[in-house]
Image (spheres, rainbow, N blue to C red):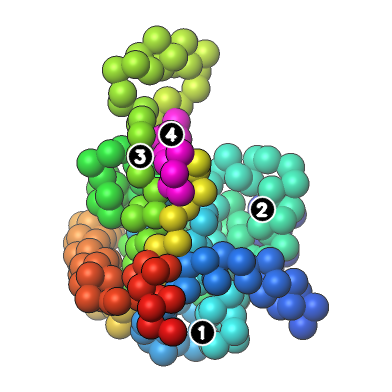
């Protein structure tokens, strides 16, 4: 069977010591600013597995911290299933492919599972990342079951994954549904743009878009074995049932992190400095 990946992405990714130093150095300011906490990394098994998580605001600010921590503590590279818009952008495509991400297709997912990789997917996609004012930490999966189907077919465990923090560090000033933007929306839609993916206008430190130094929290829950669903002759029904179970598990991980955040005196930079 051919296990090559699309778009010229490498099937085997080698992260050298120099790469690790560069990643650690690049992320050092963000790590210092957010002082992240990680839970459940020991739940990551050997061999192929699927991390299924929630997209936070803008979708890419916090993920590198989790990827670096998993690489450092577990020695594993997270192979992200990236949005088409990212893969379609030269420069961005080559950068994220260099560190393991690939276009989010079923063929690529199968190839990564066959390669015993640790795959990361966000069923909510871009729409979950460009959230509206009333959607903080809300899953926008809209009945998506493809990730569950792939896990069932490959017989790999699913790891419910949660991330919180950036949604607390930025306030949405104006989102894509704001009445003021109706004229812009009409023009964008006439031009064929996907207005539902328009990013919100945010405010962080003062009037700037610099995130406030809120702590980031990450959690990986216990594996959900998928082999029990392989005996179901109706793969669509099996995938729908498993998807609902995983959604509930991710929501439980989010609620766990919210509770940890609420009782953490070091949630804010001021709290962390007082703790010193």
Q: Earlier in the sequence, mark 2 or mark 4?
A: 2
Are dots 2 and 3 in contact, CB under 8 Å?
no
Task: Nearest to the eye among marks 2 and 4: give it.
Answer: 4
Residue 30 position in % (x across, y down): 56, 65
Residue beneath label 4, please?
A: 201
**Quarter of the view holding residue 234:** bottom left
Is label 1 in contact with label 3 (beta carbons under 8 Å)? no
Residue 204 within the segment the image draws in magenta: yes
**Residue at numbered disc 2:** 6
Q: Earlier in the sequence, mark 1 or mark 2?
A: 2
Q: Residues within 10 Å of mark 1 (few under 14, many from 20)?
A: some
Q: Secondary structure at mark 4?
A: strand
Question: Is residue 113 left or right of 185 when viewed as pictured?
Answer: right
Give me the C-alpha separation between circle 1 and circle 3: 40 Å
Residue pictured at 47% horizontal, 52% vertical: 211
Task: Name the residue beneath numbered marker 1.
Answer: 47
Residue 235's x, y, as percent?
Answer: 28, 59
First in residue order: circle 2 vs circle 3: 2
User: What SS does tag 3 mark?
Assistant: strand
Q: Are marks 4 and 3 in contact (CB under 8 Å)?
A: yes
**Magenta stretch containing residue 240, yes or no?**
no
Give the labeled residue for mark 3: 172
Residue segment shown in magenta: 198-207
Q: What residue is drawn where x is 28% and y is 71%?
A: 261
User: Could you say whether the residue bearing mark 1 is in a helix, strand or loop?
Assistant: loop
Q: Is residue 180 visible?
A: yes
Q: Earlier in the sequence, mark 1 or mark 3?
A: 1
**Spatial separation of the CA atoms under disc 1 and disc 2:** 22 Å
Q: Quadrant of residue 222?
A: bottom left
């Amino acid at each position: 069977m051919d296990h090559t990946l699309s778009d010229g992405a490498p099937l085997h990714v080698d992260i050298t010591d120099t790469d690790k130093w560069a990643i650690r150095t690049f992320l050092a300011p963000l790590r210092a600013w957010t002082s992240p906490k990680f839970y459940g990394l020991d739940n990551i098994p050997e061999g192929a597995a699927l991390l299924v998580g929630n997209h936070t605001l803008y979708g890419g600010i916090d993920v590198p911290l989790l990827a670096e921590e998993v690489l450092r503590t577990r020695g594993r590279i997270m192979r992200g299933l990236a949005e088409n818009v990212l893969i379609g952008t030269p420069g961005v495509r080559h950068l994220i492919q260099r560190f393991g991400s690939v276009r989010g297709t079923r063929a690529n997912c199968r190839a990564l599972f066959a390669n015993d990789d640790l795959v990361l997917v966000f069923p909510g996609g871009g729409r979950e990342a460009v959230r509206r004012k009333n959607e903080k930490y809300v899953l926008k999966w809209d009945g998506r079951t493809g990730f569950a189907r792939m896990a069932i077919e490959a017989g790999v465990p699913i790891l419910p994954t949660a991330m919180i923090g950036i949604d607390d560090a930025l306030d949405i000033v104006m989102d894509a549904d704001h009445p003021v933007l109706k004229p812009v929306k009409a023009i964008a839609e006439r031009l064929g743009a996907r207005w539902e993916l328009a990013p919100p206008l945010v405010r962080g430190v003062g009037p700037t878009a610099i995130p406030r130094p809120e702590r980031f929290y990450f959690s990986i829950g216990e594996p959900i074995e998928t082999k029990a669903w392989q005996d179901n002759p109706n793969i669509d029904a099996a995938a729908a049932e498993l998807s609902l179970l995983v959604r509930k598990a991710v929501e439980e991980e989010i609620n766990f992190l919210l509770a940890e955040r609420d009782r953490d005196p070091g949630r804010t930079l001021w709290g962390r400095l007082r703790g010193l």
